[in-house]
Image (tube, rainbow, N blue to C red):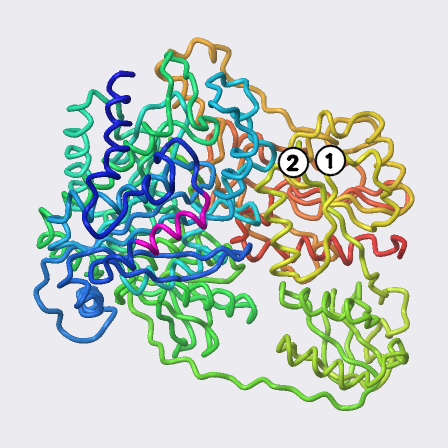
């Protein structure tokens, strides 16, 4: 095997001397043999630019976005001269094939293949392979380009990749050390896998919360390729995975899509068999959760596939694996290059059939539900419209007064009154199957052994009432509303409080030094009723602000925030504005733990929430510095999910308790609760499951994995009971649909406040094992425990998970600004 890869290495090096007359091979351009070093993003971009400049009639380069760290995102379009000349015609004709553009498509035999590399930054062989694939397509396999357009995204996540590459280049030995214990095989926190905000971009396709995803979707939806491949790496002891995928397959995936995956996989196998390379198929990587780089394209009609090469961030330039094989970067990028070219080869051989079957996918007449109707909070509806617009999914306004069908709130057949503010999404549109995937109440699961969460239904995620109707609901085009408001001189102004947009408005007011109050009890004034949490801005509290009305008016227009004027502090129904039940909101100073022990994904979601959504200052404190940190500078400390055994040692725990007793607030999320459960001084307790089977250990080895699913909850939706008189739940109804990501359960608090809890274990969507369900009844979801003048606030369920569960985000804002508001102001 080592001799084989020596030959491959020499072959790669030799390519630089046998290149076509117009372009340089990667090794020649870079100045080192490809695979002997990791290339930085700017080098990769420069290589693609050089090829595009050398062959402008065959390669077109397009910058489609910029990352948070200002790195450019590029696509390369590669094809024959004739196809590049007619590129726009090919694109438009393909969209006509889907119905996304009006007009009749002309017969087409051009296949569109999109290859995406390095969505996970530390799976760094992928981008190296992208350069070699580009070169070989234009030199050795030009024949494939006669009837294919190949779109290459060389680095979906350049921020993460450069984080990994820069770390490795400054850390690695020369020559590289194959000992896995060497520092070059041990990435420090947070690693190169995620993007700038530490999001996993391969879980963000459907939600597009990150700038890289949003930018990519804009151009992806302009093309709608026939094939999309997402290149990855897996553990160093795994060989290579390619399609066909494992079960479960979502039910909308067609027989053709399944069969063509197999056809592609068999072609790969021919190449791998010829070289004696190991691979596996139909295991681990399923096609269910819609936000992956294989499932999202699949639900958009493509043949969506993941390819996984053994190696990952641990492998570096070379590592000795458990089988005694030295796995090198040269080997890894060679495998990816072979499968990339093999994919294009199969597409070229089947271009006509690809076009024909692709067109058939967009016939949605057989879908059970013809319309989804949602109503509720205006800001939540607007948020859903924004999401649908990102995917070019059409929606309209309801025309009737009542609709019947599957009622999401009750989980059974029912009806709902509606008006023209209700949103209607029909499935008889080109992207009707994606509509089904995003809106369906409970996706059909063919196998409980799945790679990711099993529930995501957007009406639950956005906190909206919804009906799924088997008949098409009458609707009409939305009329744009003009809600511009100009404030008049008054005693004060009241803002609603029921969405994240309201919290954004509050945060901006505080940062502009406005004094803002909130009410803990409902009241009425000037003929208007105001609910708990309503914000109150009075002229008297803000006398020191020059041009108070002008500045307030400017902020309300910036946020499109409706305010109701009140003319007196004397309310029609109490409390009055000066009541102790209407409290001044502190300008909170918020800190969050980061670094070793914290989940980088959880920390990243919090960081992104404060910077990109709430737009409120956040100080990051590294766990290594916690013992030396003066917590008295902060009102709130957020502890992300993580493992804090060595961080929250006896000394730091004492420090934390003393700070809370003095008025601080700790917000603990998900796994962070383990640090406080069953500990002295805390009423938070684990709820342990009791096995009903004394013969658990007699389960045969081959059945253990499947049997264990009885203890799992793989992202399921439950209906919780909410105490919406507690400040943490202001703006919510008396129920809330929560996304439960695991089976960890905590008993109801004996002291403190059980703000939200499960009083039944009905699963509204997703998979939950029977043993896990048995342990969930009467368990905590959100709670507050007082300690001295301060509080520990518990989020059993992570409302910021992947930043798509929009209806949960206000709980965190409430915890920061409202809960135990008697806490001191700095």
Along the polypeptide, which appears first: circle 1 or circle 2?
2
| Pointer 1 with pointer 2, Cβ within 8 A | yes
Q: Specify the farthest residue to the bottom.
A: 488
Side of 130 relative to 680 (left or right): left
Label ID, residue 598: 2
How far across and how far down the image is residue 725, in percent?
74, 57
How far across and how far down the image is residue 29, in percent?
34, 45
Is residue 515 found inside the magenta-colored segment of the image?
no
Q: Which residues are magenta?
A: 40-50
Residue annotated with mark 1? 623
Foreground pick, 115 / 610? 115
How far across and how far down the image is residue 112, in percent?
20, 55
Q: Secondary structure at mark 1?
A: helix
Residue drawn at x 30%, y 28% is 240
Do we see residue 257 in this rendering? no
How far across and how far down the image is residue 27, in percent?
33, 39
Q: Main secondary structure of the magenta part?
A: helix
Foreground pick, 55 / 797? 55
Which quadrant would residue 536 be assigned to in this image?
bottom right
Q: Is residue 409 above or below residue 779?
A: below
Label ID, residue 123: none
Q: Which quadrant, please, contains the C terminus?
A: bottom right
Q: Is residue 240 above or below residue 146?
A: above
Tell me how many marks there are. 2
Residue drawn at x 30%, y 51% is 152
Do we see residue 500 in this rendering? yes
């Amino acid at each position: 095997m080592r001799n084989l890869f020596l030959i491959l290495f020499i072959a790669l090096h030799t390519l630089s001397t046998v290149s076509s007359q117009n372009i340089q091979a990667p090794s020649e351009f870079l100045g080192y043999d490809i695979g002997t070093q990791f290339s930085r993003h700017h080098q990769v971009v420069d290589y693609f630019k050089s090829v595009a400049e050398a062959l402008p009639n065959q390669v077109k380069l397009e910058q489609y976005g910029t990352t948070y760290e200002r790195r450019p995102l590029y696509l390369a379009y590669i094809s024959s001269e004739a196809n590049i000349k007619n590129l726009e015609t090919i694109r438009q004709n393909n969209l006509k094939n889907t119905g996304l553009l009006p007009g009749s498509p002309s017969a087409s035999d051009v296949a569109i293949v999109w290859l995406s590399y390095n969505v996970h930054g530390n799976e760094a062989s992928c981008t190296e392979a992208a350069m070699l694939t580009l070169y070989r397509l234009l030199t050795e396999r030009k024949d494939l380009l006669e009837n294919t357009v190949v779109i290459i995204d060389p680095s979906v996540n350049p921020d993460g990749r450069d984080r990994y590459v820069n770390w490795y280049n400054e850390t690695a030995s020369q020559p590289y050390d194959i000992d896995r214990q060497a520092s070059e095989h041990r990435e420090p926190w947070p690693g190169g896998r995620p993007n700038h905000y530490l999001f996993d971009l391969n879980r963000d396709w459907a939600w597009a919360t990150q700038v890289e995803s949003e930018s990519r979707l804009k151009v992806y939806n302009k093309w709608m390729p026939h094939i999309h491949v997402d290149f990855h790496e897996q553990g160093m002891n795994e060989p290579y995975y390619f399609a066909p995928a494992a079960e479960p397959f979502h039910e909308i995936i067609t027989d053709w899509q399944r069969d063509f995956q197999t056809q592609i996989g068999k072609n790969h196998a021919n190449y791998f068999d010829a070289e004696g390379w190991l691979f596996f198929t139909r295991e681990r990587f399923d096609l269910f959760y819609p936000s992956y780089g294989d499932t999202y394209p699949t639900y958009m009609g493509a043949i969506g596939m993941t390819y996984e090469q053994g190696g990952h961030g641990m492998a570096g330039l070379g590592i000795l694996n458990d089988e005694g094989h030295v796995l090198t970067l040269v080997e890894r990028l060679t495998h990816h290059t072979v499968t990339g070219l093999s994919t294009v080869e199969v597409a070229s051989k089947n271009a006509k059939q690809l076009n024909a079957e692709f067109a058939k996918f967009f016939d949605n007449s057989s879908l059970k539900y013809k319309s989804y109707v949602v109503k509720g909070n205006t800001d939540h509806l607007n948020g859903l419209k924004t999401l649908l617009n990102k995917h070019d999914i059409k929606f309209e306004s309801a025309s009737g007064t009542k609709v019947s069908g599957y009622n999401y709130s009750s989980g059974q057949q029912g009806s709902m009154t509606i008006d023209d503010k209700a949103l209607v999404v029909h499935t008889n549109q080109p992207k009707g199957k994606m509509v089904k995937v995003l809106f369906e109440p409970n996706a059909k699961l063919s196998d409980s052994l799945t790679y990711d969460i099993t529930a995501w239904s957007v009406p639950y995620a956005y906190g909206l009432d919804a009906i799924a109707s088997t008949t098409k609901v009458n609707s009409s085009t939305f009329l744009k509303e003009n809600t511009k408001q100009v404030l008049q001189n008054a005693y004060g102004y009241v803002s609603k409080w029921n969405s994240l947009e309201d919290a954004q408005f509050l945060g901006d007011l505080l940062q502009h030094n406005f004094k803002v109050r909130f009410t803990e009890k409902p009241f009425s004034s000037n003929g208007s009723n105001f609910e708990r949490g309503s914000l109150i801005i009075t002229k008297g509290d803000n006398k020191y602000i020059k041009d108070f009305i002008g500045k307030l008016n400017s902020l309300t227009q910036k946020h499109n925030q409706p305010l109701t004027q009140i003319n007196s502090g004397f309310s029609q129904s109490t409390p009055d504005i000066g009541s102790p039940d209407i409290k001044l909101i502190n300008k909170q100073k918020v800190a969050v733990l980061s670094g070793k022990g914290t989940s980088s994904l959880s920390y990243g979601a919090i960081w992104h929430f404060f910077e990109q959504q709430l737009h409120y200052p956040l100080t990051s404190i590294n766990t290594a510095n916690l013992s030396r940190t003066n917590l008295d500078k902060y009102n709130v400390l957020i502890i992300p999910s993580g493992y804090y055994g060595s961080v929250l040692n006896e000394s730091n725990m004492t420090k934390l308790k003393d700070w809370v007793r003095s008025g601080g607030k700790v917000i603990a999320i998900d796994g962070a609760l383990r640090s406080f459960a069953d500990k002295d001084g805390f009423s938070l307790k684990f709820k342990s499951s009791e096995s009903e089977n004394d013969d658990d250990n007699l389960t045969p080895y081959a059945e253990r994995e499947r049997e264990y699913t009885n203890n799992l909850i793989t992202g399921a939706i439950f209906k919780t009971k909410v105490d919406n008189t507690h400040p943490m739940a202001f703006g919510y109804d008396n129920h809330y649909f929560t996304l439960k990501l695991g089976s960890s359960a905590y008993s109801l608090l004996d002291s403190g406040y059980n703000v939200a809890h499960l009083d039944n274990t009905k699963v509204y969507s997703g998979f939950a094992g029977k043993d896990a369900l048995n342990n969930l009844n009467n368990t905590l979801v959100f709670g507050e425990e007082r300690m001295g003048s301060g509080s520990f606030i518990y989020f059993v369920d992570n409302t910021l998970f992947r930043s798509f569960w929009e209806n949960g985000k206000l709980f965190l804002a409430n915890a920061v600004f409202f809960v135990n508001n008697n806490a001191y102001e700095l």
